[in-house]
Amino acid sequence: MKKPLEGRIALVAGATRGAGRGIATRLGEAGATVYCTGRSVRGRPASGDSRPETVEETAEQVTALGGHGIPVRCDHTVEEEVISLCGRIQQEQGRLDILVNDIWGCDRLTHFGQPFWKQSIPDARVMLERAVLTHVITSRHAVPLMLPRNQGLVVEITDGDHFAYRGHVLYDVLKMAVIRLAFAMSRDLRRTGITALAVTPGFLRSEEMLEHFGVTEANWRDGTKVDPDFIASETPAYVGRAVAALAADPNVASKAGRVHSSWALAREYGFTDVDGSQPHWVDHFTRTHGLPYPVADEARYATWGQSPIEALRPNWPES
């Protein structure tokens, strides 16, 4: 049986570990050819990064699951490297169908509970460059590979499907920035067949989070002794299957410009996590804590609608 993304070409920028690896591997599970990029390759870890994961491992997992994984070392803060990457994809494939911007690299620079007046400015500059500018650079050079065929999907990976404060000024600005980036790109793309949107995982059981709680995937539930909310966590494959489902949906354009969650998409499309479960962060949160969850629904997007500049200049931007 043909897989839903067989023949599709994807680029997952920031595929070394975590959500990026989960997305790359599940696009492969759906049959896609996936360019897996990051700064950590075998024998050459990213500067200042002591973690063992590499883009080669991700690409091998993509292939093992039925896709075709292609590892490429790329520092997405360096425009020349992104240009070279996109040139290679154009030369080897002639097009790009799916772009996922998951570049982050800021965990060690984020100190929750620290007020902004104690934030290191050099760290803030690095965070803005790594978590936002990289997405802008990559989209700038990857989306033109979609334009000739007038179709494609651009996915911005964020944290949270709400517009509320996230506990750290820079973290909040960065995660809201990529939600807004997906919305703004969708406005520029509205007269094309290309869809831009944002996706968030829930409580992610990433390699780093498992290590933080001193558990493995085999005994992850023991992590609830550290944080009871960990019981509602999900593997990176869950958000990966969310992105794969979006990429396979012929009506995905109806979701343009919005932020979507792994748990809501799981119920809509019917996919599960690797253990067959369907973790639902909002259900857990409201049931456990008895508090409302301010999801970014259409009412909250209302003020993001027709803008004054679009009213005055309806043909902006020019094609």
Image (spheres, rainbow, N blue to C red):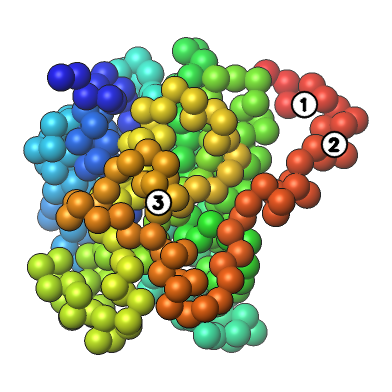
Give the quarter of the image for residue 12: top left
Q: Secondary structure at mark 2?
A: helix
Label 3 or label 1, whichever comes before in sequence order: 3
Q: Distance between the Cα atoms at labels 2 and 1? A: 8 Å
Residue carrying label 1: 316
- x and y percent of residue 5 in the render? 28, 25
Residue carrying label 2: 309
Q: Residues within 10 Å of mark 1 (few under 14, many from 20)?
A: few
User: Relative to 89, is 180 on the left or the right?
Assistant: right
Relative height, residue 199 to residue 310 (above, below): below
Asked whether the beta carbons under mark 2 and mark 1 sit within 8 Å of each other, the answer is yes
Q: Which mark is residue 262?
A: 3
Identify the residue at horizontal 30%, vertical 55% (top origin).
278
Q: Distance between the Cα atoms at labels 3 and 1? A: 33 Å
- Can residue 304 be seen? yes
- x and y percent of residue 115 in the render? 60, 85
Label 3 or label 2, whichever comes before in sequence order: 3
Looking at the picture, which amino acid does disc 2 mark? Ile
